[in-house]
């Protein structure tokens, strides 16, 4: 049976988050985030239970179907455990319930690399994806030229090979928009009008972006797109960008991203608050029809 390989998600291609921040590929900004006290404590408990069960790291890895390197990272508090890990680890370690009860309380210092790799896995399997973006066009809607302009705007500037790998990885994710997926993912995008007014990459790149947006909105019935107007005195998104995902088992996760950090949120109470904010943003943004009309007028003015 295949093991999860945490080193294969983003690092080889030097994938970046939505803002162009490095998600993998080496260097201080790309490594595992700094461990928190709760992750170190969780890892210590895993190790203690494993040793009490008389299992080596390799034997335990075989039982839970994760690599021994992933087990080491969890035990050392360097990796946020997946829910699947806890489900598999509990029976192997005596079914105490300790890991299951501890999982919702785990936190760690922000680190975009690990958070985005896990988010990308959730994103690929989600049945609903909601995105509010105030900095740039969401990655799933970007053109190749726009993705290149964004990557070249955020220091450190990558070399040509890394840049091409990064853009290819981002564009490959756009397959998620397809209406032929079973079931198709339901998308909601709320983007600040100012993002398009900025004209990242220049007017030619911006024209392509408008054309791409119009193509997706008019050609994909599973995509809802709203613009947040330049003037909005009451605004629920002042804390920054927001992405929400609903999985096939109807669990919700949230990913938020900032300067050199990202955070994956699984706590239901926090998610409830952020869902309320997203609902408010939907009511404050232009309707989908009005947004489409504004996009066409903005495109015509270029």
Image (tube, grey):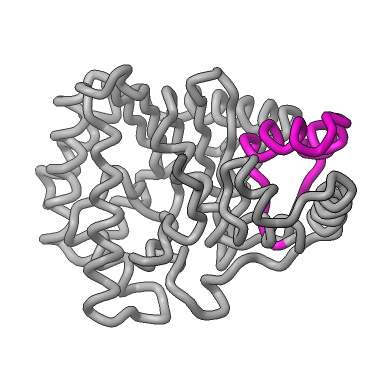
Name which residue lies at 42% across and 23% down: 127
In the rendered view, would you say 252 is above or below 302? above
The magenta segment: 78-107
Name which residue lies at 12% across and 47% down: 301
In the rendered view, would you say 217 is above or below 174? above
In the rendered view, would you say 244 is above or below 163? above
Please name whichever residue, 167 or 18, is drawn nearer the observer in this view of the structure: 167
Please identify the dominant SS of the magenta region. helix
Please name whichever residue, 161 or 283, is drawn nearer the observer in this view of the structure: 161
Name which residue lies at 70% across and 62% down: 78
Q: Please check the rendered image and state whether residue 240 is part of the magenta-colored stretch, yes or no.
A: no
- Say which quarter of the image contains residue 225: top left
Please name whichever residue, 3 or 272, is drawn nearer the observer in this view of the structure: 3
In the rendered view, would you say 96 is above or below 68? above
Name which residue lies at 43% across and 37% down: 123
Q: In this view, does 204 lie to the left or right of 288?
A: left
Residue 196 in percent (x, y) is at: 29, 51
Residue 53 in percent (x, y) is at: 85, 44
Please name whichever residue, 89 or 301, is drawn nearer the observer in this view of the structure: 89
Q: Can residue 189 be seen in this view?
A: yes
Q: Please check the rendered image and state whether residue 104 is part of the magenta-colored stretch, yes or no.
A: yes
- Say which quarter of the image contains residue 153: bottom left
Q: In this view, does 106 lie to the left or right of 63?
A: right
Q: Is residue 38 visible?
A: no
Q: Is residue 100 left or right of residue 171?
A: right
- Say which quarter of the image contains residue 211: top left
Residue 274 in percent (x, y) is at: 64, 33
Total numbered labels: 0
Residue 1 in percent (x, y) is at: 46, 40
Q: In this view, does 5 lie to the left or right of 224?
A: right
């Amino acid at each position: 049976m295949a093991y999860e390989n945490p080193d294969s998600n983003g690092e080889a291609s030097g994938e970046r988050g939505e803002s162009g921040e490095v998600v993998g590929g080496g260097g201080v900004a790309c490594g595992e985030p700094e461990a928190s006290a709760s992750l170190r404590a969780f890892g210590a408990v895993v190790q203690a239970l494993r040793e009490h069960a008389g299992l080596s790291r390799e034997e335990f890895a075989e039982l839970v179907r994760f690599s021994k390197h992933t087990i080491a990272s969890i035990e050392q508090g360097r990796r946020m455990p997946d829910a699947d890990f806890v489900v598999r680890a509990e029976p192997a370690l005596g079914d105490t319930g300790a890991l299951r009860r501890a999982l919702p309380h785990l936190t760690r210092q922000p680190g975009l690399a690990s958070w985005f790799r896990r988010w990308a896995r959730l994103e690929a399997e989600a049945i609903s994806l909601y995105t509010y973006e105030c900095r740039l066009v969401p990655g799933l809607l970007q053109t190749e030229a726009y993705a290149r302009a964004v990557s070249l705007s955020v220091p450190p500037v990558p070399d040509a090979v890394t840049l091409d790998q990064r853009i290819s990885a981002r564009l490959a994710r756009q397959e998620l928009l397809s209406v032929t997926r079973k079931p198709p993912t339901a998308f909601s995008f709320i983007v600040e009008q100012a993002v398009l007014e900025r004209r990242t990459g220049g007017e030619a790149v911006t024209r392509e972006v408008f054309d791409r947006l119009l193509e997706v909105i008019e050609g994909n019935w599973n995509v809802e797109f709203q613009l947040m107007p330049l003037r909005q005195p009451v605004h629920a998104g002042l804390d920054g960008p927001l992405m929400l995902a609903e999985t096939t088992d109807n669990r919700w996760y949230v990913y938020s991203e900032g300067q050199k950090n990202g955070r994956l949120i699984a706590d239901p109470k926090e998610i409830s608050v952020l869902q309320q904010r997203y609902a408010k943003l939907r009511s404050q943004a232009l309707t989908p029809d009005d947004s489409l009309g504004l996009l066409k007028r903005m495109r015509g003015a270029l």
